[in-house]
Image (spheres, rainbow, N blue to C red):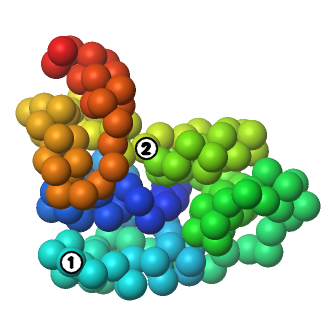
């Protein structure tokens, strides 16, 4: 299974010290150079966890040039999102992990299967790796990662926690 992630969900998992979930669920995760640079620039208590993940779980993979279709679909996105989508299209990725609404829309427009942080945690609960989704989402939000009440409510409802 080829899984490619954007920066946000990785930072969120680092905030809650939950990178191991990605390894259990997917083995490893590919990231393009722009995401790698964004992770290296991240400060705070999660930076050591990000550094550790970059030594094994996360694999920096060159991003291909943007095709005209990807360029059109991602014209309003940052370099990280653009490279994630270009890499996912080139590798025919099984899954793209991205939280930003515009990035998710562009990825779907390109025919990619998309999930976000909440989706990863839902998969982890279904696999028996975590006991509950909502408390982790709340912890991540308390540590500074923006998540709406609606995301918390929908995720909790999907796993029978509401």
> Which residue is outermost to the left?
131
On screen, residue 62 versus residue 157, left or right, reads right
Q: Nearer the viewer, mark 2 or mark 1?
A: 1
Task: Please tell me the numbered disc located at residue 116.
Answer: 2
Please, what secondary structure does the residue beneath circle 2 have?
A: loop
For image coordinates 44% across by 65% down, the residue present is: 7
Q: Is residue 42 above or below residue 102?
A: below
On screen, residue 19 versus residue 54, left or right, reads left
Task: Please tell me the numbered disc located at residue 32.
Answer: none
Residue 20 at what x, y percent from top left?
20, 59
On screen, residue 160 versus residue 73, left or right, reads left
For image coordinates 35% across by 62% down, the residue present is: 10
- Which residue is at the front of the view, 65 or 94? 65
Q: Is residue 99 above or below residue 13?
A: above
For image coordinates 46% across by 77% down, the residue present is: 38
On screen, residue 15 versus residue 59, left or right, reads left
Please, what secondary structure does the residue beneath circle 1 have?
A: loop
Residue 68 at what x, y percent from top left?
90, 61
Instruction: Determine which residue is flagged by label 1.
Output: 44
Residue 18 at what x, y percent from top left?
18, 56
């Amino acid at each position: 299974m080829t899984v490619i992630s954007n920066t946000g969900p990785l930072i969120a998992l680092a905030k809650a010290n939950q990178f191991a979930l990605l390894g259990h669920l997917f083995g490893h995760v590919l990231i393009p150079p722009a995401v790698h640079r964004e992770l290296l620039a991240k400060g705070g208590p999660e930076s050591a966890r990000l550094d550790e993940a970059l030594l094994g779980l996360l694999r920096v993979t060159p991003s291909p040039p943007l095709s005209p279709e990807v360029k059109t679909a991602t014209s309003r996105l940052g370099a990280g999102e653009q490279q994630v989508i270009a890499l996912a299209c080139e590798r025919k990725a099984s899954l793209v992990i991205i939280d930003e609404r515009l990035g998710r829309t562009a990825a779907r427009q390109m025919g990619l299967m998309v999930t976000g942080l909440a989706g990863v945690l839902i998969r982890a609960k279904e696999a028996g790796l975590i006991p509950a989704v909502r408390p982790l989402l709340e912890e991540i939000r308390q540590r500074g990662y923006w998540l709406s009440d609606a995301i918390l409510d929908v995720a909790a409802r999907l796993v029978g926690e509401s």
